[in-house]
Image (cartoon, rainbow, N blue to C red):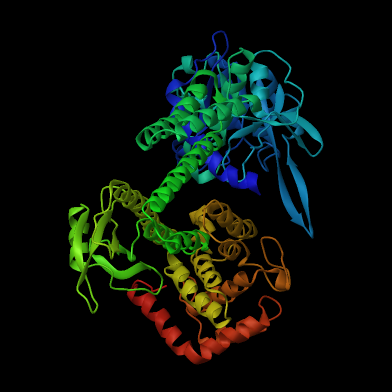
């Protein structure tokens, strides 16, 4: 569990360093070929679609490409494409392609695999080149990607077993063929892809430009050429450390550069050996221990330089020799020494308090505050410690609203104490000016007494996010150490308050993004205008009636919004067809739950329940649904809810190919499918809701459909 938590921080941090080191990209090794890409891009897809040839194209297109690349002088040609089956009705084109492969003689084909659910078990299915193609290929390479737990492709396989057959990676096979070697035998394991070698930019030519001769043959001559899909519509895009999603063929090309650099003896990206990592941490520990005993100003400067040295050293090692140092543990080491230094500072505070003859009661309160469990964001504990250290009678934290005004909510120490700490007018002035203000205050009571009040703005960036108020019953001014303590705690509190506000903003942005996706689905599938939003509203009502937890209700709301997102991947001529679908078109439509799952699965923060709604809302109670054939209560509850409302809304709404059915007829259809398609208990609940609110629901459908008003969800 500890290693998993570390990886959550280590992986994106390593990605950041890798991107930052791209300015020091290694040179292409002399005497070795470079790589190039022939991209099946949007331009190529459109050109052939205009010629009535939708993708995937007949194999004679690849025959033309092979001949052109051969004439241009490619060292090897690797296809990141599926040639596992012969094309029905295209025997001549397939045979022509099969004859061209050995004639060119430097062709590498790809192998992959997929898993399908058969009953209760998963069956591995191999996608190997058809025998007539494989027999003439110079090599076959595995196109499988090594995907980390967060969905990012950082590593590459040297080879893979596919249904007990051993294959080198596609990049390894392409490099070996280009160099006139036998592809290296299959070996287990992965290696980090040296993404620094994405620079200089890999030459990329459009498939259609190559076919039609609109390119410079010098770009191809003497290079390892990879052919694959780069168009986003074909969904072969993967997250990489470089940032935006990159195509699989691009990843193969960068991997090939990495393998060529290995053969040339150049240093490639690798993790530093353990002894080097330990030496780095030991050096920082010794330096941190020495700095921790210095005076406060020197200690802050020293630790600041140490913190800066960690990324600087990591970048230098990465740029010069490809060594990836782990920055998390060194930074943690520096932080621990800094905390130890703070503990030393706290001890000096304690001694000064003793020297000032602070009472044992104050010391007891300090201990009580430090032993108090941290709740909420920990702000209450910070106020308690600050109050005890500076001898405050009360401390208050006031937050600012986005309009720059203080809101009415406040966090007060001691708990249950005076909720009127500070003057709101003075606090607002401090928030506006951004300057600390110290003033005398009157203490109410039988005797007229005066005390001290300190107002400190909380400014984590350019804008103040709140005000910290410290009141003392002692009118004596705070000494330099106490003022510095208030300022330091105020700075930390400002960061915490700002983080809380950022989290609130992120949640709002996340919800807005989900709604934008739903809008895109509705815009694509025009006849279901507002269908996703109605489904979300009604599914949420059912979840509430079932008494589900709030987080589960919210997940169902999001899942219902997104349930048809996979239709983005279905061709318009099928999705918008007004008449009955044929068998092939029906199978294409039935792929949309899996397509939708693949689209939304990488969204961080999206609950599993929402993903279940997208993937399983077409499963049936009797197990005859799709895509996995789940039955009865094996179908997630959320998907069962969405399924009922989905069918009800479709039957109740007008479509280009049908009129809206009357409610009695809709009920009759749904009742007949109880135990076949639907969960009986959920249908009963839904009908109860219809009995209570059905008329209002039907009117709401009519209103949304006719006026196209924004739907509240």
Query: Residue sitting at 63 percent across and 56 percent down?
Result: 584
Q: Nearer the viewer, residue 154 or 50?
A: 154
Instruction: Indicate the position of residue 497 as horizontal and vertical percent values.
Output: 36, 57
Q: Nearer the viewer, residue 458 or 57?
A: 458
Q: Is any atom of residue 151 visible in this view?
A: no
Query: Residue sitting at 46 percent across and 38 percent down?
Result: 243
In the rendered view, would you say 56 is above or below 456?
above
Query: Residue sitting at 53 percent across and 69 percent down?
Result: 551
Q: Given the current orientation, which residue lies at the most extreme right position?
A: 164
Instruction: Indicate the position of residue 643 as horizontal and vertical percent values.
Output: 59, 72
Quarter of the view holding residue 193: top right
In the rendered view, would you say 174 is above or below 543?
above
Instruction: Indicate the position of residue 51 as horizontal and vertical percent values.
Output: 48, 40
Query: Is residue 81 rendered to the left or right of residue 401?
Result: right
Query: Residue sitting at 51 percent across and 82 percent down?
Result: 661
Quadrant of the rendering where the C terminus is positioned? bottom left
Quarter of the view holding residue 96: top right
Query: Is residue 241 rendered to the left or right of residue 474?
Result: right
Query: Is residue 370 rendered to the left or right of residue 173?
Result: left
Instruction: Indicate the position of residue 610 as horizontal and vertical percent values.
Output: 56, 64
Q: Is any atom of residue 273 visible in this view?
A: yes
In the rendered view, would you say 57 is above or below 276?
below
Query: Is residue 96 rendered to the left or right of residue 509?
Result: right
């Amino acid at each position: 569990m500890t290693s998993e938590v570390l990886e959550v921080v280590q992986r994106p941090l390593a990605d950041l360093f890798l991107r930052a080191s791209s300015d020091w990209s290694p040179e292409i090794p002399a005497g070795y070929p470079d790589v190039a890409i022939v991209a099946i891009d949007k331009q190529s897809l459109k050109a052939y679609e205009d010629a009535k040839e939708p993708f995937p194209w007949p194999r004679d297109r690849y025959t033309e490409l092979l001949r052109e690349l051969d004439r241009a002088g490619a060292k090897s040609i690797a296809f990141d494409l599926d040639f596992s089956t012969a094309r029905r009705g295209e025997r001549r084109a397939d045979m022509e392609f099969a004859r061209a492969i050995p004639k060119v003689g430097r062709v590498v084909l790809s192998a992959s695999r997929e898993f399908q659910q058969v009953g209760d078990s998963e069956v591995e299915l191999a996608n190997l080149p058809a025998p007539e193609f494989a027999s003439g290929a110079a090599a076959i390479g595995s196109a499988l990607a090594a995907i980390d737990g967060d969905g990012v492709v950082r590593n590459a396989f040297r080879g893979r077993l596919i249904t007990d057959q051993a294959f080198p990676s596609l990049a390894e096979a392409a490099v070996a063929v280009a160099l006139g070697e036998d592809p290296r035998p299959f070996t287990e394991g992965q290696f980090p892809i040296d993404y620094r070698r994405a620079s200089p930019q890999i030459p990329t030519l459009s498939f259609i430009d190559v076919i039609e001769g609109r390119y410079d043959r010098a770009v191809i001559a003497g290079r390892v050429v990879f052919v694959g899909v780069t168009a986003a519509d074909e969904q072969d895009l993967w997250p990489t450390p470089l940032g935006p999603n990159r195509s699989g063929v691009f990843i193969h090309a960068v991997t090939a550069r990495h393998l060529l650099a290995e053969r040339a003896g150049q240093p490639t990206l690798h993790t530093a050996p353990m002894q080097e990592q330990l030496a780095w941490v030991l050096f920082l520990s010794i330096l941190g221990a020495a700095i921790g005993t210095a005076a406060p100003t020197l200690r802050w400067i020293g630790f600041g330089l140490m913190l800066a040295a960690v990324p600087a050293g990591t970048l230098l090692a990465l740029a010069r020799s490809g060594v990836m140092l782990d920055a998390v543990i060194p930074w943690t080491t520096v932080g621990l020494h800094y905390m130890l230094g703070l503990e030393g500072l706290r001890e000096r505070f304690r001694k000064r308090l003793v020297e000032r003859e602070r009472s044992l009661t104050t010391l007891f309160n300090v201990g009580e505050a430090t032993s108090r469990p941290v709740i909420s964001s920990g702000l209450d504990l910070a106020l308690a410690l600050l109050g005890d250290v500076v001898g405050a009678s009360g401390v208050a934290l006031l937050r600012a609203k986005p309009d720059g005004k203080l809101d009415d909510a406040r966090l007060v120490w001691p708990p249950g104490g005076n909720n009127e700490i500070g003057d709101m007018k003075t606090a607002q002035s401090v928030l506006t000016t951004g300057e600390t203000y110290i003033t005398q205050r009157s203490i109410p009571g039988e005797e007229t007494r005066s005390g001290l009040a300190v107002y400190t703005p909380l400014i984590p960036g350019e804008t103040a996010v709140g005000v910290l108020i410290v009141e003392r019953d002692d009118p004596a001014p705070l000494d330099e150490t106490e003022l510095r303590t208030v300022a330091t705690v105020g700075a930390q509190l400002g960061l915490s308050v700002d983080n809380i506000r950022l989290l609130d903003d992120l949640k709002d942005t996340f919800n807005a993004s989900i709604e934008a996706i739903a809008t895109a689905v509705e815009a694509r599938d025009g006849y279901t205008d507002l269908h996703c939003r109605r489904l979300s509203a009604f599914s949420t009502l059912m979840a509430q009636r079932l008494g589900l937890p709030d987080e589960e209700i919210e997940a169902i709301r999001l899942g219902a919004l997104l349930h048809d997102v996979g239709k983005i991947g279905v061709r318009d001529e099928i999705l918008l067809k007004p008449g009955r679908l044929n068998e092939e078109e029906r199978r294409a439509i039935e792929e949309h739950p899996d397509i939708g799952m693949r689209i939304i699965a990488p969204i961080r923060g999206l609950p599993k329940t929402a993903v279940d709604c997208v993937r399983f809302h077409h499963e049936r109670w009797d197990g005859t649904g799709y895509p996995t054939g789940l039955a009865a209560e094996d179908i997630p509850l959320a998907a069962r809810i969405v399924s009922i409302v989905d069918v009800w809304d479709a039957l109740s709404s007008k479509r280009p190919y049908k009129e809206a059915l009357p409610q009695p007829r809709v009920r009759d259809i749904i009742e007949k499918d109880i135990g076949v398609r639907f969960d009986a208990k959920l249908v009963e609940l839904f009908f109860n809701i219809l009995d209570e609110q059905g008329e209002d629901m039907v009117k709401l459908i009519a209103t949304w459909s006719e006026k196209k008003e924004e739907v509240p969800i």
